[in-house]
Image (spheres, helix red, strand yellow):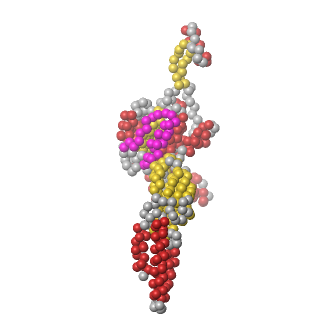
């Protein structure tokens, strides 16, 4: 009987996102117990009917009170505001403060939680709610993004219990906010601090001896009162019988252009970071160093088309432009169109620049394209090819040797017996896998040698160790005046 009576109530609850609590189970258990007693005595039927009717009336009243008290079909009486920064950094907690105002006539008891986009985690995930009519509650939590990009925080979710605790209603309140998650720029502040204290060697950046002076000789001219007497050229003065000074020109601002491959070559992931994530972090670090050196920096992001282009400029504001252009770029499972990227470069960047392309090579087809296009730049620009290593490939090539050394250390054997122990300590699959990996690495080294032979600068590094070699290469270019 209770099931039949409750059918309309169940339909109404489903339509209003209202669900029974554990107290419903207690009521149902009581009804079931009385139903069992009717088997032994017909007199219990009247008790069962009375009990079921009472349960239906009480729960229906409780449902109506919850429905009306929480605002019915509209939730205008429940106001939610979110205070959160518009920007954040990857894997750095972002503080989010929620304010809930109760404009209803009912005491709101339950819990609530903030919106949680994909690739986000929250601490804590939920907050308790006990809010009397006319008051407001505050809750502070931390959201952590595990991916770069632009994210929308659209709602706040509340779960409110009815006055008699038989029902709980799910309420969604629209609270739109947008947050842009950028790469963690802590490395920039670390670099600035170490540069001030002359400890850049701690992060792998080495000091490069600069060839020549900071200023280069331009011409001789007559002395004026504002000239430094140390710049007087005494030989020319004696020859001309007139005070003559040497005039110098400061190093002009040089140009750097990054070309980030966002195609299938940079889709590999390790420890939650793709190759493109590491490439972007290293490029931003090098851009920061170059901007501090007074150079102009630009960037092209491309895959099967050009996604973003930032013209080379100098100044502190250029760093923000680079961040805005790169923070929402992700690797795509498409074949990169190097021809379109280099055509765009030739069309908009005619002045000689250090062109740094960060990519990867895995087969002969894409390697030939990379080599050809970088080599063709040698006459107009200074090309720098950055090829990202696959750590799993190197680990696979080293696997037999490491396994044999481990076996030797356990058996007390010398390192000289390593090769003889390979057959007994390493399975065939590992050996074949290592041979295939070694063959690919030999081919890859030939590609690198071909790039260097054609006048292309090369940086070959693991993705998570790319920053220091890339910055060192830039400082060497500056020191040797290669541009």
Using the rendered view, name the quadrant where residue 211 is placed. Answer: top right
Taking the magenta stretch, the answer to whether it contains residue 309 is yes
Vertical comparison of 363 with 316: above or below:
below
Residue depicted at 47% across the width and 34% down the height: 313
* Region of the chain picked out in magenta, as a range: 305-331
Vertical comparison of 254 with 171: above or below:
above
Residue depicted at 50% across the width and 81% down the height: 30
In the image, residue 335 lies at what x, y percent?
Answer: 37, 47
**In this orientation, which residue lies closer to the viewer: 432 or 467?**
467
Taking the magenta stretch, the answer to whether it contains residue 306 is yes
Specify the quadrant that holds the N terminus: bottom left
Residue at the bottom extreme of this rendering: 41
In the image, residue 205 lies at what x, y percent?
Answer: 57, 39
**In this orientation, which residue lies closer to the viewer: 451 or 383?**
383
In the image, residue 160 lies at what x, y percent?
Answer: 51, 65
Could you tell me if residue 421 is visible in this image?
Answer: no
Vertical comparison of 343 with 327: above or below:
above
Could you tell me if residue 296 is visible in this image?
Answer: yes
In the image, residue 201 lies at what x, y percent?
Answer: 60, 40
């Amino acid at each position: 009987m209770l099931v039949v009576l409750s059918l309309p109530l169940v339909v109404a609850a489903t339509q209003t996102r209202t669900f029974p609590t554990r107290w419903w189970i207690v009521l149902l258990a009581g009804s079931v117990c009385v139903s069992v007693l009717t088997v032994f005595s017909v007199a219990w039927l009247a008790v069962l009917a009375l009990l079921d009717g009472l349960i239906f009336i009480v729960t229906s009243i409780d449902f109506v009170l919850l429905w009306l008290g929480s605002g019915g079909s509209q939730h205008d009486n429940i106001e939610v505001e979110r205070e959160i920064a518009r920007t954040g950094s990857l894997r750095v907690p972002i503080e989010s403060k929620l304010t809930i105002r109760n404009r209803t006539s009912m005491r709101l008891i339950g819990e609530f939680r903030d919106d949680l986009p994909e690739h986000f985690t929250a601490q804590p995930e939920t907050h308790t709610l006990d809010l009397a009519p006319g008051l407001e509650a505050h809750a502070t939590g931390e959201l952590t993004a595990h991916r770069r990009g632009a994210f929308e925080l659209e709602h706040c979710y509340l779960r409110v219990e009815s006055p008699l605790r038989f029902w709980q209603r799910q309420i969604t309140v629209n609270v739109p906010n947008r947050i842009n998650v950028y790469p963690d720029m802590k490395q920039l502040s670390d670099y600035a601090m170490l540069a001030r204290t002359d400890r850049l060697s701690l992060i792998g950046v080495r000091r490069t001896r600069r060839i020549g002076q900071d200023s280069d000789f331009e011409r001789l001219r007559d002395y004026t009162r504002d000239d430094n007497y140390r710049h007087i050229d005494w030989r020319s003065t004696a020859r001309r019988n007139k005070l003559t000074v040497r005039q110098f020109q400061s190093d002009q601002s040089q140009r750097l252009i990054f070309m980030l491959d966002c195609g299938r070559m940079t889709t590999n992931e390790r420890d939650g970071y793709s190759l493109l994530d590491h490439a972007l972090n290293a490029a931003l670090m090098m851009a920061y160093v170059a901007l501090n050196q007074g150079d102009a920096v630009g960037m092209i992001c491309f895959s099967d088309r050009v996604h973003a282009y930032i013209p080379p400029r100098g100044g502190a504001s250029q760093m923000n432009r680079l961040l805005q252009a790169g923070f929402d770029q992700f690797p795509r499972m498409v074949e990169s169109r190097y021809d379109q990227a280099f055509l765009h470069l030739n069309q908009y960047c005619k002045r000689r620049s250090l062109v740094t392309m960060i990519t990867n090579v895995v087969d002969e087809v894409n390697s030939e394209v990379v080599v050809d296009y970088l080599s063709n730049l040698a006459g107009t620009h200074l090309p720098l090819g950055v090829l990202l290593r696959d750590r799993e490939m190197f680990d696979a090539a080293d696997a037999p040797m490491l396994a044999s050394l481990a076996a030797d250390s356990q058996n007390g054997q010398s390192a000289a017996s390593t090769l003889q122990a390979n057959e007994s300590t390493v399975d065939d699959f590992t050996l074949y896998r290592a041979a295939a990996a070694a063959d690919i690495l030999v081919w890859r080294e030939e590609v690198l040698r071909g790039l260097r032979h054609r006048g292309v600068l090369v940086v070959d590094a693991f993705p998570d160790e790319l920053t220091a070699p890339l910055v060192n290469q830039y400082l060497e270019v500056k020191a040797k005046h290669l541009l």
